Image: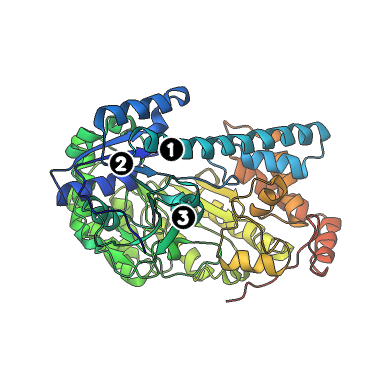
Amino acid sequence: MQTPSPTAARSVLYVRLPCWKIYPGGVIYVADFIHKRRPDIHQHLLDLAVVAPAQRRNKLAERLATLRPDIVAFSWRNMQSFGPHPEDDALDVVMNFDHSPNWWRRIKAAKDAFRIIGDYIGSRLRNFGYMRLVRRLLPDSRIVVGGTAVSIFGQYVAAKCPPDSIVVVGEGEDTMLSIVDGFTEPVGEFFYKDPSGQVSHRTRTETFDLHSLTAVDFPYVESIFPAFHDYLGDDIGVHTKRGCPHQCHFCLYNKIEGAHQRYRDPLEIAREIETLNRRYGVKRIWFTDAQFCSTLRSIEHVEHILDHLLEKKLDIAWSGYLRLNHLTPAIAGKMMATGMASIDLSFTGSQEIIDSLTLGYSLEQQMAAFRMFKAMGHRDQKVKLYMPLNAPGETVCTLKKTIEKVKELYALFGRENVLPFIFFIGVQPNTPVERLLISQAYLPADYNPLTLNPFIIKKLLYNPLPLGRLIGRAYLKAMESLDHNSEYIGRATLDVIEHELSKPEIVARCREAVALPLGSGLEEIKPAVAIPE
């Protein structure tokens, strides 16, 4: 493939593209890595997430004029328009549009949906506009684009970038090092749009040595990142490993990070957290791994991290997505002793759904692990259940089983400590769930994952009839009657669902519906099926 002409860089400007305010851990790890290997390179991080929208373009132009960087590296976190987040009410809008019995609310939801889609269109156009601004003001600077959105939609981003742009897929430390060194020996996976506008692709052939990542030099980060202190009262992301060997049918982690797990040095991880806590007063740590503990080997790695944290006696509260099937009483005890703030995990109370989504664990193992946490000193830590309701394979029976298991957790931990987060599977490109839904004609074979068609967007937030309407109306009813001072929306929604499922006519209607044949319309009812390997 053609690559940029070899010129070693002397300066890099990192630009975190606008998103909700969340610690920019990925780009910080890259900047720290480059500094430790090429300390003479001048770096600066501009975070547009904390800049007022009306000032963003001018702020970027000002930095470009002042620094005149050889490389401008953009970090792009979010791109799909169906992904609700703390600054987006898309889920409420879809619920009201699809399921509200009140026509005025449905009309208002339709209006809100077009507003949200308009915001996403504007955001994408502005992001590519920032790149064109760089090319206009600094025609000889290299443009690099990375981040979560790019890892999923790299080819689309490359097509829209200005000529002579490098779009990095997946981890970026070693790729960025090869770019600042002149790109004579390209490393990693990336798309390159050459000066003539042709896009070529390189797949990763080498493995990045994650063990080489030492504790972040936060005083250096502080010197290049003016907004660093704006985040110190929030959750600060720390990653301990990359890669996921599991094959969950809706997830892309094993594609983005690879299926082989690689680990950082546990002592370096503990040193990183110690600096955050002792020097900067950081109290809240979020482990950003796909799952903090997920395999037998990874749980041994977790135990080493916990041992180092125990030795340092840090005043922190930490969380991270957990997989509990290899948990032991000793490790559960160390988790509690080091300040675990909450138990966060994907949860369904039905082994059938676990198996159909190939989540790869036993429900009984998971429930035993919950009892283990209680026995090892659980007090008032929240139990956060991320529940993919109405996933492919869901039936009245499996939904009832899930509610019964959640009630068991209420009894174990106290109802006030259990937070069911109700969400629906987001259909991601090149996953088994996507292939299944295309084969069922639920999605067109040629659909665009980045479509702005509202009817396709609704389908990408997978919640089909008949259970979709029952769940949607339960959510809306819970929202109407909710006392936010004493109740939580997820618990209230499950209460309404349980009440509805006790009605004989609802049960009969749903059982009859799931027996219907496959079809292709939006109102078509899909049967419960297992996802093929």
Label 1 CA crowd tier, 10 Å (few <14, some 14–19, many 20+):
some
Q: Which residue type carries mark 3? A: Gly
The residue identified by callout 3 is 154
The residue identified by callout 1 is 132
SS of the residue at dot 1? helix
| Side of 60 where 5 appears, left or right | left
Q: Where, by quadrant of the figure, is residue 518 drawn?
A: bottom right
Camera-side mark, 1 or 2: 2
Q: Is residue 481 visible?
A: no
Label 2 CA crowd tier, 10 Å (few <14, some 14–19, many 20+):
few
Marker disc for residue 286: none
Residue occupying image coordinates x 53% and y 68%: 363
Q: How far across and down, in percent of the image, does residue 529 sit?
A: 69, 71
Q: Where, by quadrant of the figure, is residue 349 drawn?
A: bottom right
Q: Earlier in the sequence, mark 1 or mark 2?
A: 1
Q: Earlier in the sequence, mark 1 or mark 3?
A: 1
Disc 3 to disc 2: CB gap under 8 Å? no
Spatial CA span between label 1 and label 3: 17 Å
| Side of 80 where 455 appears, left or right | right
Q: Is residue 292 visible?
A: yes
Q: Quadrant of the N terminus?
A: bottom left
Q: Quadrant of the C terminus?
A: bottom right
Marker disc for residue 140: 2
Q: Which residue type carries mark 1? A: Arg
